[in-house]
Amino acid sequence: MQTKVDNQPAVTIHVLSRAAASATQPRLVELLQDAVDNGASVGYLAPLSATDAAGYWAPLIAGLDPAQRRLLVAEIGGTIAGTVQLALETRPNGNHRAEVAKLLVHTEYRRRGVATALMAALEQEARAAGRTLLVLDTQSGEPAEMLYFALGYVLTGSVPGYARNPDGRLAPTSFMYKVLE
């Protein structure tokens, strides 16, 4: 899938196989470090070491399975600019839904439509997998929350002090959903 915003280079989205993800692990490590070190609340405290970031990606990549978890990346000019995951619920009572996880866009590529392109591709993947409901959580009041609202996600509620910011302060988390048509 390719999208182009204004006069920016085209954003190309790929769903990575386990082998392709393994080959790109160093860039995925950089993306996670960049996100955390620039304030994204995605499960880690700053500064995030390359060892800790690799410790996140290695088991995730080893467990990639298109029937359970899909890893999407956005490329601009051959460089991975961002990533997002689609975690497909496999239990019979929830196999109509999936979770959006770890939407990351490198700071060098923000405000270029990368996150929007990743989310559009993720929704397309979810539909293709027969999913009609997406759920996610994000830090309340941050740009990611505004993006999700703009993409049609609905707030179900916010929990105060749910997670720590990368600087260690407790922050509220918003829980959201989107019904896919």
Image: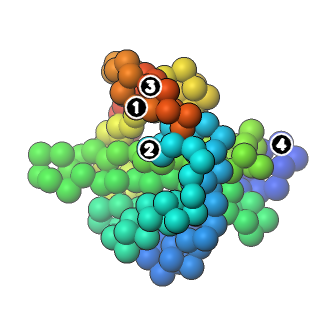
Q: Earlier in the sequence, mark 4 or mark 1?
A: 4
Label 1 to label 2, Cα distance in Å? 8 Å
181 and 173: which one is in front?
173
Outermost residue on the left side: it is 92
For the residue labelled by badge 1, is the local secondary structure a helix, a strand or a loop? Answer: strand
Q: Which residue is mark 4?
A: 6
- Front tag of 2 and 3: 3
Label at residue 163: 1
Are there few (<14), some (14-19), or many (20+) residues within 10 Å of tag 3? few
For the residue labelled by badge 4, is the local secondary structure a helix, a strand or a loop? Answer: loop
Are there few (<14), some (14-19), or many (20+) residues within 10 Å of tag 1? some
Q: Residue at x 68, y 56 (%)?
A: 81
181 and 96: which one is in front?
96
Q: Could you tell whether 158 is left or right of 150 in the image?
A: left
Residue type at mark 3 is Leu
Pointers 1 and 2 in contact (C-beta within 8 Å): yes
